[in-house]
Image (tube, grey):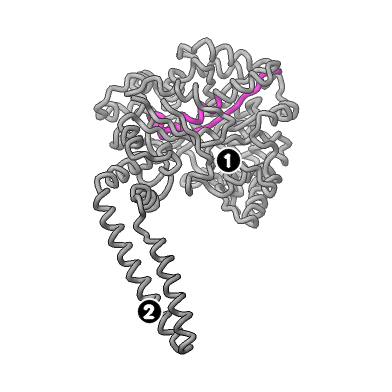
Amino acid sequence: MRLEKINLGETGNSFSPIFLDYMKGDEKLAPFFEHLPKISAFEKAIEKKEFSLDGRNLLSEILKEQYRGLQAKQAVNLNIEALKQENTFTITTGHQLNIFSGPLYFIYKIVTVINACKVLQEKYPAFNFVPVYWMASEDHDFEEINHFTLFGNTHTWETNQKGPVGRFSTRDMALLLESIPEKLPLFEKAYRENDTLAAATRHYVHELFGGEGLVVVDGDDARLKKAFIPIIKEDILHNHANKLVEETSSQLESLHYKGQVFPREINFFYMEDGIRERIVKDSQGYKVLNTDLLFSETEILELIDESPEKFSPNVILRPLYQEVLLPNLAYVGGPAEVAYWLQLKGVFEYYKMPFPVIMPRNFALIINKTNARKFDKLELEAKELFLPFHELKQKFIDSRVENGYHLEKEKESLTLLFDDIKAKAIKKDKSLEGFVGAETNKAMKILEGISKRLQKAEEQNQSTAIHQLENIKEKLFPGGGLQERKENILNFYINTPDIIQQFLDNFDPFDFRFNVIVEDE
């Protein structure tokens, strides 16, 4: 494989202004984060992160239980045990439980946290660094995770189950598994041998990355939620997060940045099997939307103490929940995640929690062998692929015309000729200036017409190559978007089983350029 790297600013409109400015370390964003994503920043992050031994022991024991029934690889067992030690810290990413791993960028997230831990281990050998994947098992947006794309076909899991997706039974997946023409043993085993979507996701993620020591955490646990009780009560009674995020969002908007997430007065859902609904307060008390559940203040506070697992944080407070439970130094996310974390710094300050290093994940475009042949034949530069197609086509045609068809030299000569004629005409009769100018414009339009005819002729001459160009652009940027947001890892893993290892070997977690992977013959 060949690996080319492109600056993020050369990838067209692939990234938002706030993300690009953050990556540049723009001073106006300084109030919204604690550390820039640099290796040197982790020394201060370690100094600021305090985590109790009781919390470490509880986390380690719960993780051992969550892995029960799964033959955990030695690297994972060692990392779970290491979490008990005061000099052990985590680097975390989180993601929804997309079936069959969902879009490619999920894999890139995990590769980034694993490689970040390796780099930090070398830089700070006195400490241990554990890569963590936090499963968004409490999420209820099933439509976002119930499908994946394989070789151009979308496969969808149909089920009537409701509530937190991590608790969904995998029995309903039988029809989907049978409908997929390709054999996918890893995923079939995960979904057939585990009762819930969360357990199945842990299974296949462990098979893919357990050898690297990746620890999978499921926050949907009553014992873990106990540590979050004070914050649950605070938010439900006083709504501080709502006010703080609104203030921060307003400040970002004044800098012409758009908000990514929007807070509620109460940033918790009520959660049971089959239910995950918002909690709202009105004159009657605390209601659970779309149910008959209603609590007085006394009742809801008692419920929080007795059953904290029934309270699920939304996108505003889930990051805080992660940081309460983990001895974490950095969160690795995509551009939208990086942007919304910048809205949360005030919340962390209010709850006196250290704000982690916010790191972007690795970004990549894979050009498989078939497309690599076309790519090389067309003599393209990797960064040109990010151009809109009409610009890419124009640049391609221009590069194939030896003397050019825009007739720029001819236009320049014609301009000089008419300037000379105009000068002579004015000497004879100043009123001729307008006439000569009009004739100049006519002549220029004639040249423009000839230029367009020449371009059209050149497009016809290059029609086969242009068709190939259009084809490769659509293959690599399906629907006009980035490949990593649409394609599934299996599109490449089936034919190149070591492709994940290639990512691990070649992606640099602190090199924030776009990776273009060109597969060799």
Q: Determine whether 41 is above or below 53 in the image.
A: below
Foreground: 279 or 413?
413
* Callout 2 secondary element: helix
Q: Is 49 part of what is drawn in magenta?
A: no
Residue 80's label in the rendered image is none
Ranked by sequence position, the earlier of labels 2 and 1 is: 1
Q: Determine whether 311 is above or below 247 in the image.
A: above
Q: Position of residue 145 (x, y in %)?
A: 40, 36
Q: Which segment is the magenta one?
A: 87-114
| Structural crowding at the residue carrying mark 2, measured as other residues with C-alpha within 10 Å and reported as few (<14), some (14–19) or many (≥20) | few
Residue holding disc 2: 439
Foreground: 499 or 305?
499
- Quadrant position of the C terminus in the picture: top left
Q: What type is the residue that disc 2 sits on?
A: Glu
Residue at 43% x, 28% y: name it: 2
Mark toward the viewer: 2 or 1? 2
Q: Is 105 part of what is drawn in magenta?
A: yes
Residue 338's label in the rendered image is 1
Foreground: 402 or 18?
402
Residue at 55% x, 12% y: name it: 77
